[in-house]
Amino acid sequence: MKRDVRLIALLLAQFAVAGCSQSPTGGAGVTYEDIETDEIAAQDAGSDASTSVTGETGQATDMGSETADASTGDVDPDEDIAADSGTETVVSPAVVTDPPDDPGVSQAAASTVTLTPEQEAQLAGVELTPEQWASLAGIQLQPDYFDKIFFVVDGAQRIQFDDLDLEKVLNMTYIPPFATDYFPPWMQDLDGKRVRLRGFMYTTFDDVDQFLLCRDLGPCCFGPNPRADYRIPVHLQAGETTDYIHQIPFDVVGTFHIHLTIDDLGRVGHTYAMSEATIIRL
């Protein structure tokens, strides 16, 4: 009886050992360490799978970027150059030389006007027309006025307005502030000499001690902008006066002066003057 009990207990023990060493499906027994290892391996496998998917996605993304870059950069090089050229044209436009504001500047260059530094200084700030520049280029002593001889009457040299006409003498249609630089010697010699000159009075007042002696009664003297060499300021002798001599020529005897008056704009008002003068009616 005891032997049978021990035999049954032994058999039960063997069955118990066999049950612990086999899985419920009859496989090998799995320990806690095995389970933990399997879970870690499974997690690692999942991570690898995720990494693999992510890597493929990243690669696809990179490929997309490259595709975008390629589509953006896939431009004809000539178009790039044209675009750059257009940009440069806007930023740095071609330099265009505009014609000078003063047409006289180009006219002076075309007329090859040569001025001394002193003459250039006298023209500083003066605006000349092309015709005036051309006049400067054409200044030269005319053949009929290379030399002059004047008759002397009562101690005064007899001169005429033609002798003082700078257009006739020097081809000077425009009288610059340095006109005296071109005066011939015989004209320079008249300065300070007693002369006798015939003309017309320009004044509407009586009992005056000064007036303008004009070449004639035409527009050059009584109209707008008369030439500076067509009218001469006359100052009578001290204590002497005159009434207006209406449209009748008369002679004036006095000391002749080459004296240019110039306004703030550089324009010549008068080129000559007479002082200590007396009137001789005809």
Image (tube, grey):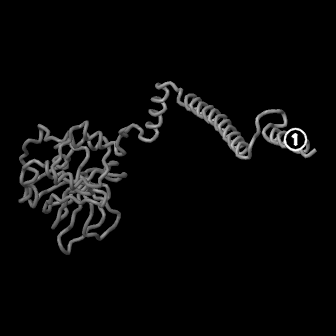
Which quadrant of the structure image shows residue 51? top right
For residue 209, side relative to residue 55 (left or right): left
Q: Amino acid at mark 1?
A: Leu
Give the residue at mark 1: 7
Residue 128 visible in the picture: yes
**Percent position (x, y) of residue 23?**
81, 37
Which quadrant of the structure image shows residue 54? top right
Q: Quadrant of the C terminus?
A: bottom left
**Percent position (x, y) of residue 85?**
44, 33
Q: Nearer the viewer, residue 170 or 99?
A: 99
For residue 153, side relative to residue 48 (left or right): left
Which quadrant of the structure image shows residue 260? bottom left
Q: Residues within 10 Å of mark 1 (few under 14, many from 20)?
A: few
**Considering only vertical position in the picture, is 14 above or below 68?**
below
**Percent position (x, y) of residue 154?**
7, 59
Q: Nearer the viewer, residue 20 or 83?
A: 20
**Percent position (x, y) of residue 221?**
31, 52
Q: Nearer the viewer, residue 193 or 239?
A: 193
Residue 282 visible in the picture: no
Secondary structure under badge 1?
Answer: helix
Q: Could you tell me which residue is drawn at 18 percent across and 62 percent down?
A: 274
Q: Could you tell me which residue is drawn at 47 percent across and 26 percent down?
A: 77
Q: Nearer the viewer, residue 159 or 64?
A: 64
Name, please, the residue furthest toward the right.
1
For residue 35, side relative to residue 19 (left or right): left
Q: Quadrant of the N terminus?
A: top right
Q: How many circles with numbers are drawn on the protein? A: 1
Q: Could you tell me which residue is drawn at 21 percent across and 59 percent down?
A: 281
